[in-house]
Image (spheres, rainbow, N blue to C red):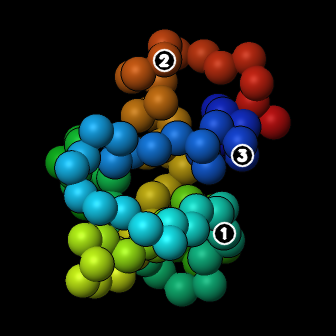
Amino acid sequence: MAQHSDQDYVQFDPFQGDEADIRLRRVRLVRVRKPHQCHVGPMLYGESHEIQPGERARYEKALIDHSFWGRYYACLPCLDKWLSDIYGDTNENAD
């Protein structure tokens, strides 16, 4: 069960502070239809895993530095862990 609200997941900017030129950014929560690698687990926690069909995830795509489209999926449990590390263990705005 998600620990944070959908709005928290969408508004959170994991790339805040990066110097890349990010344009045409689109962020949304999706229910995946096929397995996707979670990009947050390995990046922050060294835990490589796949998001399984039927699970919800944050999907983001954007044009990076005018040259390529970056796309990634992040599972909600990894985002919960990341948000909890930043903001504390609980969030009163959870759905």
Residue nearest the observer in this picture, 73 or 7:
7
Vertical placement of 61 versus 93: above or below?
Answer: below
| Crowd rating for badge 1 (residues with CA inside 10 Å; few <14, some 14–19, many 20+) | some
**Residue 3 left/right relative to 39:** right
Q: How many marks?
A: 3
**Mark nearer the N terminus (2 vs 1):** 1
- In the foreground, 71 or 35: 71
Q: Position of residue 80 (x, y in %)?
A: 51, 36
Q: Residue 6 location in percent, x, y?
A: 72, 46
* Residue at image coords 55%, 50%: 76
Q: Is residue 77 left or right of residue 7?
A: left
Q: Quadrant of residue 74?
A: bottom left
Residue 50 visible? The answer is: no
Task: Please give the residue where the numbered disc 3 appears in the rendered image.
Answer: 6
Q: Is residue 60 left or right of residue 70?
A: right
Is residue 44 something one can see in this rendering?
yes
Mark pair 2, 1: CA separation: 24 Å
Q: Are marks 3 and 1 in contact (CB under 8 Å)?
A: no
Kindly identify which residue carries mark 2: 87
